[in-house]
Amino acid sequence: MKTLLPDSIFGRTMIVLLGGLMLSHLVSFFIYYGHREEARKAAGGYAIAQRIANLARLVDEAPSDWQQRIIAASNDPSFTASISDVPIVTDDSNSSVALSVRDYLAAQLTSAGQHLPQPRVATLATENVASDPHPEDAARSHRHGASHMGLGRSVDALQVSMPLKDGDWLSFVAQFPSETSSTSRQLLVAMAIMSFVILGLSAWLVRSVVRPLDELATAADRFEKDLSAPPMPVNGTHETRQAAQAFNSMQSKLRELIENRTRLLAAISHDLRTPLTTLRLRAENHSDDEDRDKMLATIAEMNMMISATMQFAKDEAQPGPRRRTDLTALLASVVADLSDNGLPVEMAPSPPVIYECHPDIIKRALTNLIENGVKYGGSVRASIAIATSSVEILIDDDGPGIDFAELERVFQPFYRIEGSRGRETGGIGLGLAIARSAVEAHSGSLTLHNRQGGGLRARISMPT
Ligand SMILES: Nc1ncnc2c1ncn2[C@@H]1O[C@H](COP(=O)(O)OP(=O)(O)OP(=O)(O)O)[C@@H](O)[C@H]1O
Ligand SMILES: [Mg+2]
């Protein structure tokens, strides 16, 4: 059931509207048609009753050898009369049309001063009543439920038996004037046009109600990719204006928060440089050679950390504009730079992959990952490919990999695995944090996996 419903608010609202509209049209169609049928029968019944009363009077007063001729002359396909010694109507109907026709005919008899039995009237609802040579059968089928709802091919008819002075009965089967099918067709066409107009207007209205929701989703999406995205327009209904305002203020507060954090990081790193320079000058004048070298090495390491931190802060604060970039060429240039320096790095050939990104930041991320592979894994193979909805970049090395428990922790800034501390590998533990933040700024993901045959695989996946 759930899967049958459309996925959007627009689709669901339209289904509800369409269902409601069809139901209301159907109900009003039946009510209207019922009333129309009643009115048509009442008018038709009155005309038939008058004709019957006149003919009955004429036959009653005519000499008996004329009676059959008059009857024969008055018959037509929708009106047949016959004389018999018993009434053909055995069962009086109680429908409103039958009752009023009977009252009318009885009044005619009374006004003529005749004291005869009551006329008998039945309504029939069956096919081709007038051409039925056995009206009794028609009456029977009516009694057995062959009535209809006023729709379709059936024809309504009146069956009347009038008493004559000589004791005989003059019986009639008369059809109501049938409704032309063109009126029903006109009604259906009018209803269809009305439905289309109402549905068109509703679609336009629902669309305008739902549009702000789409805009909100688009704005949130844009902000995720670009911190400096412009605020979303504040318009529409009271509620959508409120939602847009709330979103804009959240966006500006978040931006402020991130900018403050980055500014603080940059300020601390920057201000640490001056005392470090002083410290370095003092250390250089230290008399003990061994102590002096150690102090200078530590100071150099601190300087490196500060530079890296400042670079990180700078990348976050002003990533520069996004550009359409060939990621394959970018990866190839990083690989070429490193292998030109004699490092064991290679890349699988691949067709160009054009992607809109901040190339400097992505390049730094790729460099960090490949350098890690060389430092901790010996040799590196890089590859790039387009998957169904993403670009996949893989950096594989042949090293020992990383313990499962450490796989996520190594992304924390300044975190280094014990074994690599103090090794001549040098790093400060910011490389993976920088790489992940770069990839996430492009709505992508960076994960590490231990490969089955040994070695580590870093996987970058960026949505296309
Ligand atoms: N390919 C790898 N194989 C094994 N261990 C790795 C690999 N890449 C990273 N690591 C481990 O994860 C830690 C964090 O890596 P990260 O790149 O963040 O810092 P770093 O390389 O130590 O220093 P930096 O990159 O800032 O110069 C490393 O110290 C290392 O122990
Ligand atoms: Mg590193």
Image (cartoon, grey):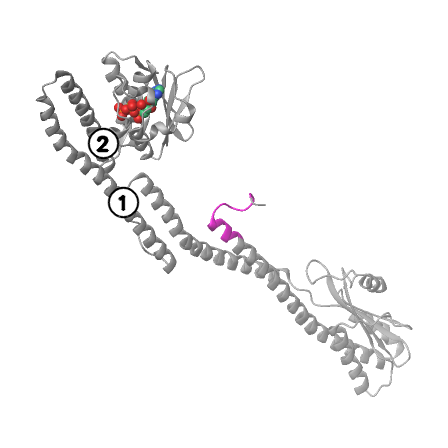
* Residue 457 coordinates in the image, percent (x, y): 38, 21
State the SS at label 1: helix
Q: Is residue 212 left or right of residue 65?
A: left
Given the image, on which type of amino acid does mark 1 rest?
A: Leu
According to the picture, the residue beneath numbered tag 2 turns out to be: 309
According to the picture, the residue beneath numbered tag 1 turns out to be: 257
Q: Nearer the viewer, residue 430 or 33?
A: 430
Question: What is the spatial separation of the Cα atoms under label 2 and label 1, in whole angstroms?
Answer: 18 Å
What residue span does the magenta drawing correspond to? 3-15
**Does the magenta segment cover residue 265?**
no
Quadrant for the C terminus, please. Answer: top left
Disc ID at residue 105:
none
Q: Nearer the viewer, residue 122 or 240?
A: 240
* Residue 138 coordinates in the image, percent (x, y): 82, 62
Q: Residue at x 54, y 60 (%)?
A: 190
Q: Report how many numbered discs are placed on residues in the image.
A: 2
Q: Is residue 85 left or right of residue 362?
A: right
Q: Is residue 114 above or below residue 223?
A: below
Residue labelled 1 has its Cβ within 8 Å of some atom of ligand 1: no
Q: Nearer the viewer, residue 456 or 418?
A: 418
* Residue 101 coordinates in the image, percent (x, y): 76, 76
